[in-house]
Amino acid sequence: MASETKNVAIYKRITTTGYIEVRGVTQVRNTPEAFTALLAQTALAPKWIANNQEVTVLSSQQNTRVVHSKFNAPWPLKNRDMVTKSTTYYKDNTLYIDIIDASTHYAESAGFVRIRDVSGQWVLSSAGNGVTIIEYRGQANPGGNIPIWLANRTLISSMSETFENIVYQLDNPPQTTQD
């Protein structure tokens, strides 16, 4: 286990590249559809994705989306960006979102280092009583000249922060008022 709090568990596995694959797990009192709705609200991304500047949808067709994400990096590192393609589907009452790298199809952004070799999967399943288990497993090459130990440590802390933010966003949906 790489990190654990009351709400979130983050696991790591070292890959052949030396970078880690992370796996995050949490539970929320909400539906899988609430999570996909959160993903669709790209303007909210900086509120829950750690170090995120913005997410822009480049294309969207049925269950497939291509998005461009920009991230802040601490000094002296350069900011990062990535382009990913996600495919959403249900199988055996479980929601899956498969994520692959789509960076070769889009020009790099000036002032950003491109994150490459991105792969991941969200898995959302019901635990009963209105509780959804959210799991993410993924890996990437951060690009540039980041020491592997720093990239791995940053990934663990970013995943932990992102998962804590997901719990907050989904367990505390905005209240609507009646006029």
Image (tube, helix red, strand yellow):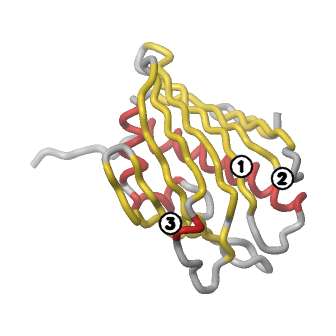
> Helix, strand, or loop for circle 2?
loop
Sooner in the amino-acid sequence: mark 1 or mark 3 = 3
Determine whether 42 is above or below 71 in the image. Answer: above
Residue farthest toward the left in the current orientation of the protein: 179
- Where, quadrant-wise, is the N terminus in this rendering? top right
Q: Nearer the viewer, residue 49 or 99?
A: 99
Q: How much space separates mark 3 and mark 2, taking CA atoms?
A: 22 Å
Asked whether disc 3 touches disc 2, contact meaning CB atoms under 8 Å apart, the reply is no
Q: Nearer the viewer, residue 106 or 171?
A: 106
Sooner in the amino-acid sequence: mark 2 or mark 1 = 2
Q: Residue at x 50, y 54 (%)?
A: 85
Determine whether 114 is above or below 85 in the image. Answer: below
User: Residue 172 vs residue 157: left or right?
Assistant: left
Residue farthest toward the top in the current orientation of the protein: 128
Point out residue 156 in the picture as x, y percentages from the top left corner: 76, 49
Residue annotated with mark 3? 68
Residue annotated with mark 2? 19
Point out residue 41 in the picture as x, y percentages from the top left corner: 37, 55
Asked whether disc 2 touches disc 1, contact meaning CB atoms under 8 Å apart, the reply is yes
User: Residue 28 vs residue 154: left or right?
Assistant: left
> What amino acid type should be assigned to the residue bearing mark 1?
Gln
Determine whether 93 is above or below 50 in the image. Answer: above
Say which quarter of the image contains residue 30.
top left
Say which quarter of the image contains residue 8.
top right
Residue annotated with mark 1? 139
> What amino acid type should be assigned to the residue bearing mark 2?
Tyr
Q: How much space separates mark 1 and mark 3, taking CA atoms?
A: 17 Å
Point out residue 44 in the picture as x, y percentages from the top left corner: 42, 58
Q: Residue at x 43, y 39 (%)?
A: 88
Estimate how packed mark 1 is, as few (under 14), some (14 to 19) or many (20 or more) residues with alpha carbons within 10 Å.
many
